[in-house]
Image (tube, rainbow, N blue to C red):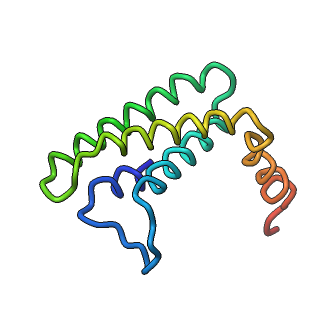
Amino acid sequence: MVAVIVGSLVPSIPTAGIPLSDKIMHFTAYGVLMLWFSQLYLGWSRIPVALLLVALGLVMEVCQGLTGYRQYDPVDMLANSIGVGLGLALGLTPLATALSWVERRFLLNNPGPR
């Protein structure tokens, strides 16, 4: 979340020479956030998280308009919200267990140094 907030408010985002669509970046960032939280919160408890992420997207867009070097764009708000919706939907698929799979596979079964 910190990366999304900072990325929303810094003057420019480094792209390493890769042409990226602004809307795809918004969509992807909020989709990944929601999918992440969908793995941490189960069932109906995901709905308040989704609403908070949509609110975050709205607030960040307003804040961008207030910076003087970033631009307010309601289409970015829509891209953020669609990303949240996609992340919420993907949280109902087997992707919702990805974090627990990684934890079981790589962390819990690894006894570590002795």
Against 104, residue 58 (above or below) is above
Which residue sits at x=43%, y=80%? Answer: 17
Q: How many numbered dots are placed on residues in this image?
A: 0
Which residue sits at x=38%, y=31%? Answer: 55
Q: Position of residue 26 (x, y in %)?
A: 44, 50
Residue extending furthest toward the bottom: 17
Q: Is residue 87 left or right of residue 57?
A: right
Against 71, residue 45 (above or below) is above
Against 2, residue 37 (above or below) is above
Q: Position of residue 84 (x, y in %)?
A: 53, 37
Closer to the camera in the image, 58 or 24: 24
Which residue sits at x=16%, y=59%? Answer: 69
Closer to the camera in the image, 76 or 108: 76
Q: Position of residue 54 (x, y in %)?
A: 43, 33
Image quarter for residue 35?
top right
Q: Is residue 94 left or right of residue 1?
A: right
Which residue sits at x=57%, y=48%? Answer: 32
Q: Is residue 72 left or right of residue 19?
A: left
Q: Position of residue 71 (x, y in %)?
A: 22, 52
Image quarter for residue 62?
top left
Quarter containing the C terminus: bottom right
Residue extending furthest toward the left: 68
